[in-house]
Amino acid sequence: MLIHFSDKTMIKGRVDIITMGCSKNLVDSEHLMRQLNECGYEVTHDSENPEGEIAVINTCGFIGDAKEESINMILEFCQRKEEGNLSKLFVMGCLSERYMSELSEEISQVDKFYGKFNWSELISDLQHTYDSSIANERVLTTPSHYAFLKISEGCNRRCAYCAIPIITGAHVSRPIEDIENEVRYLVSQGVKEFQVIAQELTFYGVDLYKRQAIAELVERIADIDGVEWIRLHYAYPSNFPMDLLRVMREKENVCKYLDIALQHVSTKILKKMLRHVTKEETYELVERMRAEVPGICLRTTMMVGFPGETDKEFEELLEFVKWAKFDRLGAFAYSEEDGTYAAENYRDSVSKKKKQERLDRLMDIQQRISTNLNCQKIGKVYKTIIDRIEGEYYIGRTEFDSPDVDTEVLIPIVDGNLEIGGFYNIRINDAAEFDLMGELA
């Protein structure tokens, strides 16, 4: 994000919070904002012109680019502090969880570094008391009609390339009752749509209940009055809980949408990745999902250039993507992460040039698939939620579209007086790769 620092004197009693990285970090920032409000502070989030006397940067430490972006943001605020325009600077989140001692030594202008899970100490360091009675409350930074709902922390999967378990530790599920209480609170605040998120949501409940309980959790959330849409993010293919598909099929307010990171399809590469799934099982899983939930929208992530990936394995991946025709697909090139199994046991054997070529080929194929799938929607009517007004259009989403990452529906303002956060039946009359054009049906 682009920050513009003014020459004005800092505003007493204001805290600026900057969130880097994923929606799981965003939820943490929202909980911190609620606590700070209770302490009497005025709080801004991701302000383009931060002017508060206190700044909190919630960092990301997932991959190299994200780490660099977080460090650059810290250094920008350090400069502001050196110039006398900032009284206190605090840093929290994944980057400081992983590199706290190194960051503390290198960046002395930061008043204190917190990790991923001890950010509540910031309240006491500001001479206030953390209020556990509002632990499930937060200040939404999203539009008021939708929220991200974090159901667990950490991950037990230990994929070869991933540093997340090193940062966040083992999988820890939140109790079902705790999540239900948060949902009821958010519904009372006007939230209608919930993006259920976790590092690996299909493992939910194993630690608490000794079983995969994600289907039960989603079913119980779906039964809460006022919950209009539930959308599921970050599933894992191995030992997928098939009962979740039944819930998705039977509950009207559970969107026919699943974000499941497959990463690759070659059995050789999947084995080296420590993914505990094969090519045949991956094909079978996609087929079964589409058979049990007709019309399901599948979003996935793929990785190219993993150590040992030859042209043969890459072609296997391309053939799979052509066959599966995923509604949404993101991709990234492998980068070596400190402390991971891959970094310690494999040689990064694919050149940067080759990685980029493969990434470009993969995304070129997916671009054509996405455009074709969007064009197939022309003439059809979809229930659509309105997120905002932009220029001459209302911007909305169907149940097959998650905020910020998926296709949006553009409806001309002249078509009617639509309510932000309202649901409408929209007929699609034109399509492109990333956008749909529609009108009131």
Image (cartoon, helix red, strand yellow):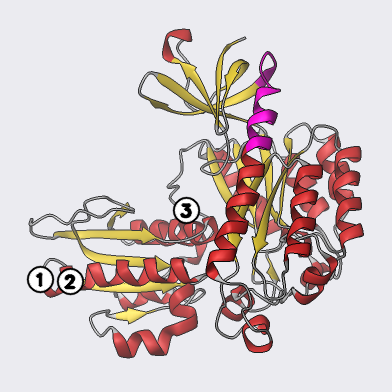
Q: Nearer the viewer, residue 423 or 320?
A: 320
Q: Quadrant of the C terminus?
A: top right
Q: Quadrant of residue 248?
A: top right
Horizontal relation, residue 149 to residue 1: left or right = right
Relative to 422, say whether 96 is above or below. Answer: below
Amino acid at dot 1: Glu
- In the image, the segment drawn in magenta is 368-382
Residue under label 2, please give it.
79
Amino acid at dot 3: Arg
Residue under label 3, please give it.
138
Residue 243, x across and y down, in percent: 89, 50
Residue under label 1, please give it.
83
Label 1 crowd (10 A; few <14 / some 14-19 / many >=20): few
Q: Nearer the viewer, residue 368 or 17?
A: 368
Earlier residue among tags 3 and 1? 1
Horizontal relation, residue 8 to residue 346: left or right = left
